[in-house]
Amino acid sequence: MTRPARRLPNGPALVLALGLAIAPAGVAGAGPADDYIAARDRAVTALAEAEKAGASPESLEKRDAAERKALERMMGGLIGPLRFKGFSASFSPATLLDGSIESGGPDGLLFSDADATTYLLVSPEPVFANWLAARAKMEGADPALGRGIAAAVGSDEFYTLAIGAEAAFSRYIDLPVTAAEGETVRAALGLFSQDLPTNTLPEAVVVTRVANGRVTVGNAAVELGITSLPVCDKAWKAASAKAEALRTAAEKSKKEDDPRWEQANAADVDASNAFRTCFARQAQGQPFLAAAVKKAEALLATARGN
């Protein structure tokens, strides 16, 4: 399953006017970035208090829209001049109201192409680092998220949270991409899905670029030109047979607390991992891997504004 499309405003490429200077890379909470974070925190707190006090949904939505509009103006100043030809943009997160999945996205601008097959999330580095640190403190979060951006990009959860919308990212293989002078980049081939990947082939490339005080996280659909990898299908079927056997046995026991239910779920994960491990091995030297790298390089070029 590909990443669910987001509805973004139509229009020409967005050009942001030159605004406030960006804080130096790696210095969280410096200058204008600190002002933005403080303003955002005040807005979230005020909305939560209004909701607790019994404000109507209509009133909350109106206030949320006004707060986000003000933050969007501050964000434009922080990010500075930026142009992606053929893309439209919206402010992220899509809401500041707690309890919505859309309130958990990074602070920044989310760009989408006309076909809704390519997305770029751009955020000032200190603001993004602040968001990432907050996500790392949530229950069950991958510990890698708490070790900074460079470590976090190695986690599938990073892409799920940063640009996955309602779909979770599963990495199949890292892609070798070339960094330009002054930037740090990372890329991978994977799948955005609302279900645990089985023997589904990857359908997306993701990239992360850190440069010029900005973090850009991108996602683009990719066509590999293959329909299956028989050897990997075989590995998946062998591993998933264990899950099926455990689940059948649990059903026969008619006990909701039968431990084999959880064992079957774990076996499903093992089967998915077996397919992806096989894929990474079989992909070496294949034309479809070269095509995926080319797609990732193109996405990075777009992220650079080229």
Image: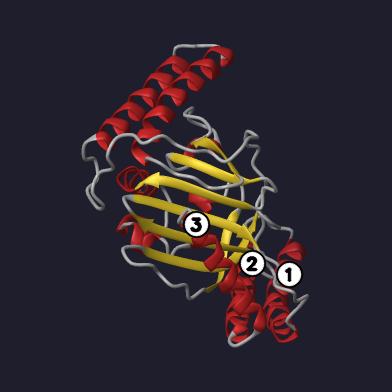
Mark nearer the N terminus (3 vs 1): 1
Q: Position of residue 151 (x, y in %)?
A: 35, 63
Going 38% across and 67% down the picture, which residue do you hit? Answer: 180
Dot 3, crowdedness within 10 Å: few (<14), some or many (≥20)? few
**Marks 2 and 1, how far apart in space?**
7 Å
The amino acid at mark 1 is Ala
Quick one: SS at disc 3?
loop
Q: Nearer the viewer, residue 225 or 283?
A: 225
Reply above or below: 291 against 257: below
Q: Quadrant of the N terminus?
A: bottom right
Going 50% across and 57% down the picture, which residue do you hit? Answer: 306
Mark nearer the N terminus (2 vs 1): 1
Q: Say which mark, if any, is on residue 306.
A: 3
Label 2 belongs to which residue? 260
Q: Say which mark, if any, is on residue 54.
A: none
- The answer to whether marks 3 and 1 mark residues whose Cβ atoms lie closer than 8 Å is no
Going 73% across and 84% down the picture, which residue do you hit? Answer: 234
Dot 2, crowdedness within 10 Å: few (<14), some or many (≥20)? many
Label 1 belongs to which residue? 249
Reply above or below: 26 against 187: above
- The answer to whether marks 2 and 1 mark residues whose Cβ atoms lie closer than 8 Å is yes
The amino acid at mark 3 is Asn
Is there any visible trace of residue 143 in the rendered image? Answer: no
Is there any visible trace of residue 91 in the rendered image? Answer: yes
